[in-house]
Amino acid sequence: MKNTLLKLATGIVLGSALTACVNTAQTSNNAALRSTGDMGVIIERATGQVQIVNHTNKDVLAEIDGLGDLSHASIVYSRDQRYAYVFGRDGGLTKVDILKDKIDNRVIQSGNSIGGAISQDGKLVAVSNYTPGGVKVFNADTLELVATIDATELVGKPKNKDGSSVRSKVVGLVDAPNHRFIFSLFDSHEIWIADFSGHDKGEEMKLTKFTDIGYFPYDALMSPDGRYYIAGLFGEDGMAMLDLWHLDKGVTRILKDYGKGDKKLPVYKMPHLEGWAMAGDYAFMPAVGQHKVLVVNTKTWQQVAEIPAHSQPIFVMAQPDNRQIWVNFAYPDNNTIQVFNTQTFELVKTLTPGPAVLHMEFTPRGEHVWMSVRDSNEVHVYDTQTQELLKTMPSKSPSGIFFTNRAHHIGL
Amino acid sequence: MKNTLLKLATGIVLGSALTACVNTAQTSNNAALRSTGDMGVIIERATGQVQIVNHTNKDVLAEIDGLGDLSHASIVYSRDQRYAYVFGRDGGLTKVDILKDKIDNRVIQSGNSIGGAISQDGKLVAVSNYTPGGVKVFNADTLELVATIDATELVGKPKNKDGSSVRSKVVGLVDAPNHRFIFSLFDSHEIWIADFSGHDKGEEMKLTKFTDIGYFPYDALMSPDGRYYIAGLFGEDGMAMLDLWHLDKGVTRILKDYGKGDKKLPVYKMPHLEGWAMAGDYAFMPAVGQHKVLVVNTKTWQQVAEIPAHSQPIFVMAQPDNRQIWVNFAYPDNNTIQVFNTQTFELVKTLTPGPAVLHMEFTPRGEHVWMSVRDSNEVHVYDTQTQELLKTMPSKSPSGIFFTNRAHHIGL
C-alpha cells in the first residue's frame, strides 16, 4: 500500500505542496493500519534503545533511540495500549508512543530506579527508586509529578553528600485493585500500601505501613487476581505475604525454608519473583542457588515437590494454558531453557537458544513464546506445543520483552 | 485505505488537490489516534447495528449499520484486536473494522446460527449453526470457507424441504489451546472436538466425538486456562464435563442435581453458562428456575452453599479481582442487578438500572462495569468499588457488550 501511494505520488505530483500532502497521508496511513493488540516492546539494554514489534507477523516495526541506561529496565502499558512506560536504571521514565514510533515524553525522575507500575484506571504511573529511596507517582498523560513517597530514613547511616538522610531502597512495586500501589522497603524491612483511590476526588493519598516484615525484601510478586502480595527475603529464609483482602491480619510468613539456607552452591543471582508460575493449585518457583524448581501448594504454602533442573533457575514461567513451565538459568548456564510438564513434572525438552537467554514472553493465548538471547543479539520465537524454533530476529543485546496484553492484567 | 486513495485520486483529477489532501490527513489522523486496547463493540439488536466504543473515555466512537438479525448476537476479536467478528442469528458473519468504522467483509454462512469462536493463532473463525446443523470454519482474513463440519443426522426426523436430512443443532462452541474448537450437539447429545493444529501444514482437520454425554446440551463454557469444557443439559439434571488434558477419561457427569429438578417455579429462561464466575476454589452459578446463586467447589464439583437472590439469575459474573459477583435476572425481574461478596456471600447492593438489563462487561482490570439496559435504550457504566453510576449513554436496544481484551483470552 505504501508502494501504491508512492507510485501514485510519483506519477502524478511534482509540485511541492502536493508532495507534502502525500507525505501526510503516508504517515497517517501507516499509523492507521496498526492496531495495538498484537504489539510489544523489546529492551535493547546496551544501546538505550527499544524495538517495537508485532507478534502476529513476528517482525520489528521500529527502533527508538535515546532511552538512557536500560539495564534491568521494565515496561508497563497505558490502558489503551498506545503508550509503553519504560523504567530505566538511571531514573529515566520514558513514555513511548507505539503508534507513532517516537518518544512522547521523558523525565529523569531519580538517580537510580528499579521498575514501576500503572494504576488500575491508567491515570497514575509509579516508579520505585533506590536513590533517593522512595516512590514517585506521575500523571500518566503528562508525566507531571503527582506525589513523592519518601522511604524510611536509615538511622545511623552516613548522610548523603547533600546532607540529606539516606532512605531505604524501594523494590517490588506493583499495582493493586482500587488504585493502590504496593511496594517493599529493602533496607528498613517494610511493606507499604499507597492508596490513591480518592485521587480523582482530590483526596490525599493514604499510606499504610507494615513493619518488621522480614530482613531485606528484594523483590515481590502479586497474584493474578490482585489478592496476595509476596516478597522474597534476601536476609533470611522464608517469604513475607500480605493478603490484601485481610489487611487486619498483617504480613505473615510463608515457605519458611525458601531462600539461600545452608547453600552448597554459590548464588549467582537471586531469582526473579515476577517469573513465578501459578498453575492450578501449584506455584512453580525458582529455588535459590540450587538446581531445582520448587513446587508449592498455594493453599497451604507448603512445598510438595521439587523438580531437578539444569542449573540455578531465574525465571519460571507458565504458559497461559498452564500445561508447561519454561525455565531459564543463571550465569554461567544461561544458554539453556528447560520445559517441564506441570502435571507430571517431567522434563519435556531442553533447548539451547544461545548465550544469555535473559527473558521470555508468551503470546497472549500462549501459542508462541519469545526469548531474548542477549549475547547472540537475537530474539527467538518458539512454538510452545512443539518447542520448534519458528523465527530468529536481530536485536541489540535484548533483555526484557513486553507484549501489550499486559495492559489488561492486575499486578504486573 | 481504499477510500483514502480514491479521494486522493479524485481530488487530483478535479484540481482540488489540497481539499482532498486535508480530508485525507484528517481521516487518517483520526484513525492514527486510535489504539485498540480500550475499545469495544455493543450489539444494538433491534436495528442490526453495532456501536464502537471507548472505555477509557466512556464514549461511542461510531455506529455501523447493516449487520442483519442481531438477536442473541455475540462477538470475538482478531488477535490484533482490529476486527470484531459478529455472529448474527440469521447466519450472518460480519467482520467489522473497528479502526476504520466500517464493515470489512460479510457472509451469510447458514440459515440460523448461534455464536462462534476464533482459533488460538487467530487464523480461523468457527460458527455454530442450528440450520443446517453443524459448524463452518472460515479463514479469518478473507472469510473464505475452510471447512464444513456436518452435525449428526437425526434418524427418523422428517427430511428438510430440499430432501436433505435434518442434523443436530450445534451450541456451546468455544476455542481451546492448540487450534481446536469444542462444541456440543443439542439433538444428538454429543460433544465434538475439531482439531485444526495441522492446518498450517496442510493437514486435515481431526474430529473426536464423545457420544451419550447427556440429554440436550444447551450451552457450555470453558475454564479460563482452556482445560475444562462444561456443558449444561436441558433434558436432565447434572452437567457434562470434558477434561481436555485427559481426553482418555471421556465425558464425566458433575453436579448431578444441577438443573430444573422438581422445580416449583416456571423457568423463564435457561441461564447463560458463559456467565459463570470462577473465583478461587468456587464457581458461582445461576440456579435454574430458582431464586438462588449456587456456590460450587471446583475441586469436588459439589455444591457447598447457595445464596438467596432477587429472582432467577441469568448471568453470574465475577469482577476481574474476584471480590464480588454481579448478577442479572430473568424476565419479568430483569430490571435489577445484585452484587454479592465472594467471601462472605453477603449482598453488597441491589441496583435497578432499568428495564431489561441483558448483559454486563467489566473493564479489563475491573474498575468499571458496563451494562446494557435494553428497554430504556441505554448503556450504564458503574464503578465496581462503590457501585455508583458514572455515566449513561444512549444505545438502541443494546444487548451484548464485548471489550477487545477478549482477544487475549482462551475459550471466550
Image: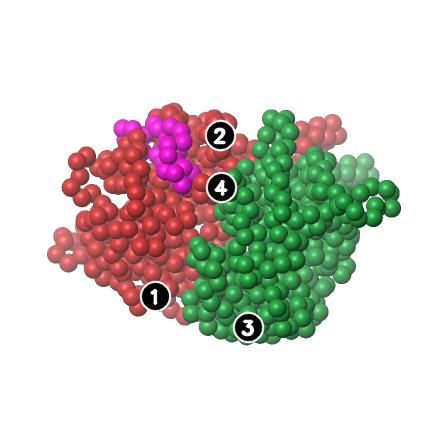
Chain colours: A red, B green
Name the subunit of mark 1: A
Q: Amino acid at mark 1?
A: His
* CA separation in Å, label 3 and label 4: 35 Å
Tag 3's secondary structure?
loop
Tag 1's secondary structure?
loop
Residue lying at 40% horizontally and 37% vertically, measured from the top left? A341
Q: Quadrant of the N terminus of chain B?
A: top right
* CA separation in Å, label 2 and label 1: 43 Å
> Are the residues tagged 3 and 4 within 8 Å (C-beta)?
no
Q: Which residue is mark 3?
A: B309
| Residue A156 at x, y percent in the picture | 12, 56
Q: Amino acid at mark 2?
A: Thr
User: Where is residue B107, by image quadrant?
Assistant: top right
Q: Is residue A153 magenta?
A: no
Is residue A287 something that shows in the picture? yes
Question: Compared with residue B9, is residue A393 higher up or lower down, i.e. above or below?
Answer: above
> Are the residues tagged 2 and 1 within 8 Å (C-beta)?
no
Q: Amino acid at mark 3?
A: Ala
Question: Compared with residue A380, is residue B129 higher up or lower down, i.e. above or below?
Answer: below
Q: Which residue is mark 2?
A: A386
Residue lying at 77% horizontally and 36% vertically, measured from the top left? B9
* CA separation in Å, label 2 and label 3: 48 Å
Residue B245, disc: 4
| Residue A117 at x, y percent in the picture | 40, 52
Q: Which residue is mark 1?
A: A246
Residue range in magenta is A324-350
Name the subunit of mark 2: A
Residue lying at 67% horizontally and 61% vertically, measured from the top left? B399
Mark found first going from the N terminus, 2 or 1 = 1
Mark found first going from the N terminus, 3 or 4 = 4
